Amino acid sequence: MEKLTFSNTDTLVVNQSQIDALLPEAREAMAKVENGTGAGNDFLGWVNLPSEIPASLLEDIESTARKLQDKCEVVVCIGIGGSYLGAKAVIEALSDSFAAYRHEPKSTKVVFAGQNIGEDYLYELMGYLADKKFGIVVISKSGTTTEPAIAFRLLKNQLEERVGKEGAAERIVAITDEHKGALRQMATEEGYKTFVIADNVGGRFSVLTPVGLLPIAVAGYDIKALVEGAKAMQEATTSQDFATNPALLYAATRNALYRAGKKIEILVNYNPKLHYVGEWWKQLYGESEGKDGKGIFPAAVDNSTDLHSMGQWIQDGERTIFETVISVAAPQHEVLIPTDNDNLDGINFLAGKKVDQVNKMAELGTRIAHVDGKVPNLSITIPALREQYLGELIYFFEKACGISGYMLGVNPFNQPGVEDYKRNMFALLGKPGYEQQTAEIKKRLS
């Protein structure tokens, strides 16, 4: 099987010997990840997950997906953050870009809710579902997170009005805590099929649990191949050397760049199907590393589209950035550029070439230009957009994130800052128990 490859392309501000000097530190950080000796070690259940997922669990997930497919034209996946981004990333990467506009009654579409509090979004979603046979996969450890709780209450009511409580129970799957929480209680009382969110796997590391695997399976993709790819990368990232462990090298290189003043990392793709991989990656690294006044700021662009907007800033703006480019070696399809007798557009020099050849030269030309503009470039290549390679990519980024966070000197597995907006929101909404905060915040706003 082809492996994900990594190359460190002209980092400019740090040389290879400087990166090599960080090898002992990177090894120490990796040992904390693998042995559970660092801060946040109660959230390391994802580390050996690919090799430890029981075959029976995968079979159960696939069986549940088939039952939902049999009953539903549409399945709404309700969750926020890591409870939806991983599944969304994989589904979008593997899907036909125009699937939403095609009428394919035999395929079950997966749509998402609970990732925002958009009233128009929810109204339009409910309108879309009005004449559809639909089901729900609701993902929440507690069942009380505001965004998914609102979406689930609305859609559960809509589904029950359509098919009754018993019918709804056959079309709702809850992925939640094993023993406690509002959603666990509701699932038990209503008789929903359930899967467990393990206590030792945080949301942003949960793609390879039922949180990500069930929606991906419902969408019709091969979760066993996804897990096998992750398993291969798990094995590939146990090496103690940069030459054979891409996660170790990536973590060390980005920390070397950060210490040299490169505070912003831009994840770049040249395939529009990878847009949500960038969104998932932003959450993974932003939530893991952005704390204690530290952290590389994660951004993402879709090229060549963003070369006509963000490209100007990247080329000539403040030199506090570096880029990590994800390249897809082979597209799924072939399209040749035709000859035009009038050649008014002036592109006959491209006639007979595949569109992807032009795209690859845009990618290479941009990387050369950005390096010339003093933007360090890293490169990650995957052979194709298939489940096994996406599994490799997901695990690669997860493992590197844990190592990089420990090298940065933070706990990569908590997210204390996420709670701040919730406290203010609850106080402003007058939630019981927040009376003191409500008074304090009203005084600030008066």
Image (spheres, rainbow, N blue to C red):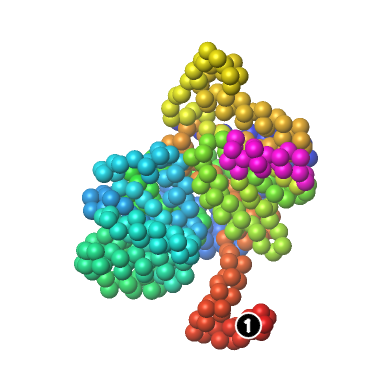
- Residue that appears at 51% across and 41% down: 274
Q: Position of residue 292 (x, y in %)?
A: 69, 64
Of residues 308 and 86, the one drawn nearer to the viewer in this rendering:
308
Q: Position of residue 117 (x, y in %)?
A: 48, 65
Label 1 element class: helix
- Residue that appears at 49% across and 84% down: 432
Residue stretch in magenta: 301-319
Kind of residue at disc 1:
Lys
Note whether 211 is above or below 423 in the view shown: above
User: Which residue is tagged 1?
Assistant: 442
- Residue that appears at 45% across and 50% down: 88
- Residue that appears at 64% across and 51% down: 298
Q: Is residue 311 left or right of residue 350?
A: right
Note whether 124 is above or below 271 in the view shown: below
Q: Which of the 4 quarters of the picture holds residue 160?
A: bottom left
Pointer 1: residues within 10 angstroms few (<14), some, or many (20+)? few
